[in-house]
Each structure stands twice: as structure tokens, then as C-alpha cells.
Amino acid sequence: MSYDLSNGDKNFSMQDLVNIVGQNALQMQTVISTVQSTAKEVKKISDDFDDFKAETRANIKDIKENGEIETEDVDLIKNLVHRKVIEVLGLPLDVPRRKWTSEQLAYYKLYSGAVYGACYREVRAKGHLAGKTPKTRAKNLKDAIKDVESWYPAYGLETLKLKAEKDRAARIEKERLANMKADQMALARVGKA
């Protein structure tokens, strides 16, 4: 039985009032139960969202650390290696190459290849700089930069210079032999004609 309290009838029996209070209590209990259930669901959704945010942050951090370095970082490493080669060769860092003397340019041309090769080879051996610079992991960038900045040829500059001179002599001899063979082949063709 439902009671309409808006009809202006103020004469309720005690039993009627107990029934009204009981109905209100049941309705309130239903509302409270619904609110509690909804609160549990909202809490669960909130916890799930917090877990999702934490997992997403961890994934982003992982991607940043294990991802490859940016183009700007590759250029930075190349510039650091270039400066280090010039420094190791004892050439002026504060003077642009186009203003170097012809002796400085010849010295750079003769020895820089060996020094570049040694620098990259020895820095990569430390494990922070990848075999191909753009493949370097972002998490290793700072250590790779420190490795380049602190590098000096493991066997000394004089050893690298000797190697460069031997390589140059071998290259000249190889060119001389190739030219000599080409000349012989040309003479043989002329002789057959």
C-alpha cells in the first residue's frame, strides 16, 4: 500500500506512519545500495584508469629510452667526432678549415681518415655508440657523447700516422699497377691491330 502525502489528509494512523517510514527506509536502503554499488564501480574504473596511465607512462619511457636517437643527435655526434679529430691532429679548432694553410690542409687530408676510423672504431667498442650512428639507443646517447669527448687514440697518434702513410703508399702502388696493366692492355690491342 502506498500513501499519498500530498492530498492534505493529515489523519494517519500509527500503523500508517510506521508503514510510510518502513517504505521510506526500504527506498532509502535501495538508493544507498545503488550509490554504494555505483561508487564501487567508479572506484574500479578509476583504479583501472590509474593502472592504464602508469602502464602508458612506462611504455612511453621504454620507447624513448630504447628508441633510436634523433637526426639532431646524429649530427651532434658527427660534429663532436669532427672536432675531436681536429683536436687530436693538433689543428686549430677556432679557425675554419677554409682558412687553414695549405700545409694544414695537406696534413688533415693525409691523416684525418685514419683518425676518424680509429675514433669511431674505439668509441663503438665501448658499446654506447651503435655500429651505425643513427641506430644508437637514446638511453646510450649521453654515454656515447662522453666517450667521444674523452677519446684519444688507444695506440697514440704516431701509430695512426704510420698506418695512414702505409695505406697511402699501398693505394698509390695499387693505382700504379692498375695504370701499368691498362697501358699494357692498350699496347697489346695496338699490336694486334
Image (cartoon, helix red, strand yellow):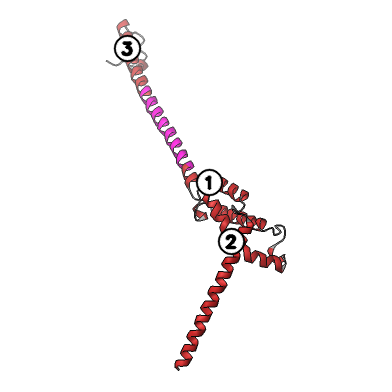
What SS does tag 3 mark?
Answer: helix
Which residue matches tag 1?
140
Q: Nearer the viewer, residue 172 or 140?
A: 172
Q: What type is the residue that disc 1 sits on?
A: Asn
Q: Nearer the viewer, mark 1 or mark 2?
A: 2
Tell which tag, 3 or 2, sits nearer the viewer.
2
Q: N-terminal of the two: label 3 or label 2?
A: 3
Numbered-mark total = 3
Would you say residue 69 is visible in this rendering?
Answer: no
Q: Cα distance, mark 3 to mark 1?
A: 71 Å
- The local secondary structure at tag 1 comes to helix
> Which residue range is magenta in the image?
36-61
Q: Is residue 179 above or below residue 111?
A: below
115 in relation to 137, above or below? below
User: Which quarter of the rendering shows the C terminus?
Assistant: bottom left
The image quadrant of residue 108 is: bottom right
Tag 2, which secondary structure? helix
Q: CA distance from mark 1 to mark 2?
A: 25 Å
The reply to whether dot 3 and dot 2 touch (C-beta < 8 Å) is no
Mark with earlier residue (1, 2): 2
Q: Amino acid at mark 3?
A: Gly
Camera-nearest residue between 21 and 130: 130
Q: Residue at x 35, y 20 (%)?
A: 33
Q: Give residue 114's mark.
A: 2
Residue ranking furthest to the bottom: 193
On the image, the x and y values in percent for residue 155 come to 59, 54
Q: Which of label 3 and label 1 is nearer to you?
A: 1
Q: Examine the image and state in which quarter residue 143 appears.
A: top right
Look at the image and tell me in which quarter the N terminus lies: top left
State the predominant SS element of the stretch in magenta.
helix
Residue that carries the numbered disc 3 in the rendered image: 22
Q: Residue at x 55, y 73 (%)?
A: 173
